[in-house]
Image: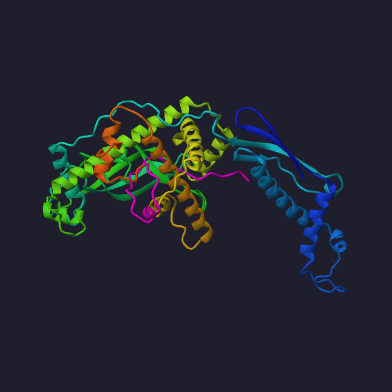
C-alpha cells in the first residue's frame, strides 16, 4: 500500500492510497480461504475446498469482494490516522467497490481529510479578561430563596384553595394543549401536568402559565417534543404555535423552616453556627460564582480563538450538525457559527490536555458519565455503548478540567478574589478547580460546578 497526504487549503488535506494488483489479490485470496474454511462441497474434505471453487461462483466472489472492500476501507482509515502528523478530525474517502479487475490492475482510492493542530506560538495562558467583582447576596435574596425552596420541597397540597387562584412559581398546573405538526399537517393534542418553574420545564411555558387561572386559555409559541414518524425513528424538538387551556391550579403546602433545614442537611444535625439562612446564602453565592465562572469561560474562549489563527474543519462541523439533526434538533435551533466555535474549542482543549497534562479524578468522570446518561439515556446492558459512554465521560472530564486550568491561568481585575489564597473558591471548598489532583485525591469528591457546554468526544467519519 502506497499512501500520500498532500496539503490543501485550511484544515483540509488530500490523500491517495494505491494498492497494486498483487496486494489486492492477496487480500482476496485470504478472504476466499476464510470463506471456504467451513464450506461443505461433495468430493472435498471440509477445510480443503480449493480456491478455484469460489472463483467459479460469481455470487460468492461478489460477497467476498464486498468484504474485502470493507476491510480495505477500514485499513485506509487506520493508515491515514496513523500516518498524519496532525490529529485527524474528519475523513471522507471516495466510494469504491472492489471488482475482479482490481486484482489485475490494482486499486487507487482518493479522498479528503481534515486535521487539527495547535499553531506555532499558540497563546493560551495569561489571557487578559474584563474586570470582575465579587458576587454578593443580600437578605432579601435569602428570604425569597427560602420561600421558593420551601414551596419546591413541599409534599402536600394546600386544601381549600380558591378556584380563581392565579398560578405562581412552584404551583402544579394541569392543562390541555393542541398544535399542528408542520411535517404531517396533523393536529396533535393532549393533557399535561407540570410544576411551574421546574428546571425541566421550558422557560417560555413557565412565563406563559404564571398568572393564569383555571378555565383560561391562550396561544403562544411553545417547545414540543415531536416523536419520529416511524417506530424507532428519532424525535425532534420544535417550537410551535399552540393553544393552552388551564384546567386547574394546585398549590403545595410549603415546608416549615425546620423541615427545610433538615431536608437540606439530609436529616443530619446542623453544625455550630449553621442556620437555614447561612446554608441558603452559601448556595446563592455558589450559584453566582458558577454563573460568573461560566461567563468568564465564555469570554476566555472568544479571546483565545481571536488571538490564534486556527482553520475551521468545516467537514467535521457538518458531521456535528448531522449528529444533532439525527438527535431530533430542528434546523431553526442549530447555530452553525456556535457549533464552529465549540468544535474548534473542543479540539484545543483535547490538545492542551495532553500538553499540560490534566488527570481528572474518578468522581469527576462519574459526574460526566451520569450527566451523559441524563442527556442520552441509560446504556442498560449494552456493554459497547457503556464503554462509549465511559470514553466520552473521560474526554468531557479532561476538557472541563483543562478549561478550568486555563481560566485559573487568565488575568483580570478581581482574579485574586476568586482564585487567590482565601479567595472565594477556597472559601467554598472548590480547591480542585483548575488544579491537577494528586494521586491521593483521585478517589476524592470533586465539587460539581456545571458549565453550560455540551461536550462530545472526537471521532472520524467512517
Majority secondary structure of magenta residues:
loop
Residue 452 falls in which quadrant of the image? top left
Q: Residue at x 60, y 36 (%)?
A: 115
Q: Residue at x 18, y 47 (%)?
A: 279
Q: How is the image coloured?
A: rainbow
31 and 17: which one is in front? 17
290 and 454: which one is in front? 290
Q: Position of residue 135 (x, y in %)?
A: 23, 34
The N terminus lies in quadrant? top right
- Is residue 450 covered in magenta? yes
Q: Position of residue 298 (x, y in %)?
A: 38, 32
Q: Residue at x 13, y 38 (%)?
A: 139
Q: Position of residue 155 (x, y in %)?
A: 19, 56
- Is residue 370 covered in magenta? no
Region of the chain picked out in magenta, as a range: 434-462
- Badge count: 0
Residue 422 visible in image = yes
Residue 167 visible in image = no
Q: Position of residue 44 (x, y in %)?
A: 86, 73
Q: Residue at x 88, y 74 (%)?
A: 43
Q: Is residue 237 left or right of residue 287?
A: right
137 and 154: which one is in front? 137
334 and 86: which one is in front? 86
Q: Is residue 369 left or right of residue 73?
A: left
Amino acid at each position: 500500500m502506497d499512501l500520500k497526504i498532500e496539503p490543501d487549503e485550511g484544515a483540509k488535506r488530500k490523500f491517495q492510497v494505491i494498492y497494486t494488483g498483487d496486494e489486492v489479490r492477496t487480500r482476496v485470496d485470504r478472504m476466499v480461504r476464510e470463506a471456504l474454511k467451513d464450506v461443505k462441497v461433495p468430493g472435498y474434505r471440509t477445510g480443503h475446498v480449493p480456491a478455484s471453487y469460489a472463483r467459479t461462483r460469481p455470487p460468492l466472489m461478489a460477497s467476498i469482494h464486498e468484504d474485502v472492500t470493507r476491510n480495505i476501507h477500514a485499513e485506509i482509515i487506520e493508515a491515514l490516522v496513523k500516518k498524519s502528523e496532525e490529529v485527524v478530525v474528519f475523513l471522507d474517502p471516495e466510494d469504491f467497490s472492489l471488482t475482479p479487475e482490481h486484482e489485475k490492475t490494482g486499486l487507487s482510492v482518493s479522498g479528503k481529510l481534515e486535521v487539527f493542530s495547535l499553531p506555532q506560538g499558540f497563546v493560551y495562558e495569561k489571557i487578559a479578561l474584563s474586570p470582575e467583582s465579587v458576587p454578593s447576596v443580600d437578605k432579601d435574596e435569602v428570604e425569597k430563596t427560602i420561600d421558593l425552596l420551601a414551596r419546591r420541597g413541599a409534599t402536600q397540597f394546600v386544601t381549600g384553595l380558591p378556584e380563581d387562584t392565579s398560578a405562581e412559581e412552584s404551583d402544579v398546573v394541569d392543562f390541555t394543549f393542541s398544535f399542528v405538526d408542520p411535517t404531517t399537517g396533523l393536529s396533535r393534542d393532549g393533557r399535561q401536568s407540570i410544576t411551574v418553574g421546574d428546571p425541566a420545564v421550558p422557560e417560555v411555558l413557565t412565563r406563559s402559565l404564571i398568572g393564569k387561572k383555571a378555565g383560561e386559555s391562550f396561544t403562544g409559541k411553545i417547545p414540543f417534543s415531536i416523536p419520529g414518524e416511524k417506530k424507532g425513528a428519532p424525535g425532534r424538538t420544535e417550537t410551535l404555535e399552540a393553544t393552552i387551556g388551564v384546567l386547574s391550579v394546585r398549590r403545595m403546602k410549603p415546608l416549615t423552616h425546620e423541615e427545610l433545614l433538615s431536608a437540606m442537611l439530609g436529616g443530619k444535625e446542623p453544625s455550630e453556627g449553621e442556620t437555614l439562612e447561612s446554608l441558603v446564602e452559601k448556595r446563592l453565592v455558589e450559584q453566582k460564582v458558577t454563573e460568573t465562572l461560566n461567563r468568564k469561560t465564555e469570554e476566555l474562549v472568544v479571546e483565545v480563538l481571536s488571538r490564534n489563527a486556527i482553520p475551521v474543519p468545516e467537514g467535521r462541523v457538518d458531521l456535528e450538525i448531522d449528529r444533532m439533526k439525527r438527535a431530533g434538533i430542528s434546523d431553526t435551533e442549530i447555530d452553525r457559527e456556535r457549533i464552529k466555535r465549540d468544535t474548534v474549542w473542543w479540539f484545543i482543549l483535547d490538545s492542551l490536555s495532553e500538553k499540560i497534562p490534566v488527570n481528572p479524578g474518578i468522581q469527576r468522570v462519574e459526574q460526566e458519565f451520569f450527566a451523559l446518561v441524563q442527556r442520552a439515556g441509560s446504556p442498560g446492558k449494552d456493554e459497547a455503548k457503556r464503554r462509549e459512554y465511559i470514553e466520552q465521560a473521560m474526554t468531557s472530564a479532561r476538557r472541563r478540567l483543562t478549561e478550568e486550568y486555563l481560566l485559573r491561568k487568565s488575568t483580570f481585575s478581581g482574579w485574586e478574589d476568586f482564585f487567590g489564597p482565601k479567595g472565594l473558591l477556597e472559601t467554598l471548598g472548590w480547591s480542585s478547580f483548575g488544579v491537577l489532583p494528586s494521586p491521593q485525591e483521585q478517589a476524592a469528591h470533586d465539587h460539581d460546578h456545571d458549565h453550560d457546554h455540551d461536550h462530545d468526544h472526537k471521532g472520524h467519519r467512517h
